[in-house]
Amino acid sequence: MADPRAVRRLARNPAAWVSAGILLVVAVACVVWPAFLPASLGEPSPNQYAPPSWEHPFGTDLNGRDQLYRVLTGGRISLLVGLCGASVSLVIGAAWGLVAGYAGGWLDAWMMRFVDVLYSVPRLIFILIAINAFNAQLQSFATGMGWGWLVQSSRIAILILTLGVIEWLTMARIVRGQVLALKSRQFIAAAKVLGQSHAGILLRHLLPNLSGVILIYLTLAIPAVIIDESFLSFLGLGIQAPQASWGSLLADGAGAINPLRSFWWLLVFPAACMSVSLLALNFLGDALRDAFDPRG
Amino acid sequence: MGLSLLRRFWGLAAVLFCVVSITFFLIRLSPGGPFDGERKIPEAIERELLAKYRLDGSLWEQYSGYVGDLVRGDLRLSTKYRNRSVNEILAQTLPVTLCLGGVAFVLAAAGGIWLGAFAAMHRHTWRDAGAMFFALAAISLPSYIIGPVLILIFGLDLGWLPVGGWGSWEHLILPSVTLAAPAMAAIARLMRGSMAETLQQDFVRTARAKGLRETAVVYRHALRVAVLPVVSYLGPLAAHLLTGSIVVETIFHIPGAGGFFVHSILNRDGFLLGGMVIVYCVLLVAFNLAVDLGYGLLDRRIRG
């Protein structure tokens, strides 16, 4: 992980610096800025479909809500779902790949065959069904437990879990490949000879050596989860109004474009924010991969 | 060869059975029946309706009955679009979706392979960097950004192409480009890596030493080997395109299966949803089988 040559390669890559800077700006803006804006901006007002002006830099939407405020708070949800969903996928994928690679033999064959099958099935379609199947149950569960916060954001919780459950496949493949390469190294043989348990070898010896790879694919999984979330929200099956994410804002924006009058600001600003963030994340992931694995 | 094919068919059947079961139970698990509406239906009528759609009896009876019907090729009636069978709806909408997906598939594969080979030929030059920037941008931008932006530019501002609908070949251009762009970019990145690796192999040096032109070396000799990782990506690619077409059909108002898919979830139209999931999965699994067989034909090394 802390290979100094890799860190130096990364530091010399301008694309990595620019991407990291952009991401920092977007994240801070989404998380902190809305706290300093009056909350009334997010409430409906009679000022419908106002074009961008000094008062409303991104214009206003159908209900007269300030689009800048909506984009920032929507970004909060998109980034939150992306980060948490990618972490869920990381845990599943890393565990799956570790066990498959370390165990080898028929267990490995079956586990990877399962991954292959999932790869070729339209997974998002199952998620569409699962979200709608489980949401009401989680809500009644949360109501029963008296967890008010979960009742409100049950949709987000479901999205995080289900998207994490479908985006782990690449991680599992990569981790397994690395484990296969590491398994035959001498320090693993030494640990075995010294009587270290299987769990100890997996957690204390293999996992630390995988942290670089895991970090790279975490960076690449976040944009994938954000795209999935916005796909669902675009279809109206993800985040529900009045909450918004970049995907649902894009859906509103795409609906506001027609040959008679196009309210372009409803589409262009969420699209720009989302694409800049996704591009930066993908560039950063690529730069990390180039730095840690120059052959790839 | 025959034995492995037989085994693959068994695997296919197992996957389909799992898909059917998961879909059925997920739909039945979700609260609310297909006939819940604003008004409460009288109980006697609801019982009649449930009996007509064979939704009465225990969960196990419903499940086994459904699987039995599926084996006979009957996808049952839609509970929302009364008196239309799922078979009928699919027969009307699926050709549209497949036409769009097919065009996008060819576009993505051909464009991606060309772009990747081009970038690998000019590795570490501005051409390479430009092509790869374009590819990364296309991966990062989902179709619901690319689609509306294309409509805004080519449909509304320039007025060259129709903004939506279905009928002539002009209607096909914007949706298929929108659908193909991310897949094309993914293929281009894959192709670039594998082509760059292939170009360092011995047989390429021999071809160059014979005095062949560089384009002949790349496109006639190296391409045949370098394309193999792309071929194995075609299965996941088809899955991406089928999922993506749901959104693209919504954006461009195309009367394909995608719209019915979304509405069947919102309307709790279980049999329509189940039928669509099953048909999609059959298509994909069969396609994957074809890809695997094609892979064996292309790569003599793994032919057993």
Image: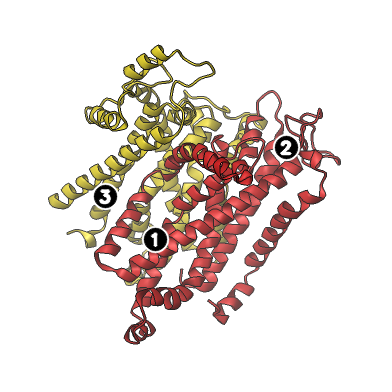
Chain colours: A red, B yellow
Query: Label 2: how many residues lie within 10 Å, few (<14), some (14-19) or many (20+)?
Result: many
Question: Marks 2 and 3, how far apart in space?
Answer: 47 Å
Question: Marks 3 and 1, how far apart in space?
Answer: 22 Å
The numbered mark at residue B218 is 1
Q: Which of A170 and B107 is in front in this view?
A: A170
Badge 3 element? helix
Query: Label 3: how many residues lie within 10 Å, few (<14), some (14-19) or many (20+)?
Result: few
The numbered mark at residue A156 is none
Judging from the image, mark 3 belongs to the subunit labelled B
* Residue at the disc numbered 3: B294
* Residue at the disc numbered 2: A265
First in sequence, mark 3 or 1: give its number: 1
Question: Marks 2 and 1, how far apart in space?
Answer: 46 Å
Task: Locate residue B294 relative to residue B170 in the image: left or right.
Answer: left
Judging from the image, mark 2 belongs to the subunit labelled A
Q: What residue type is labelled 1?
A: Val
Badge 1 element? helix
Q: Do the residues at pointers 3 and 1 share their chain?
A: yes
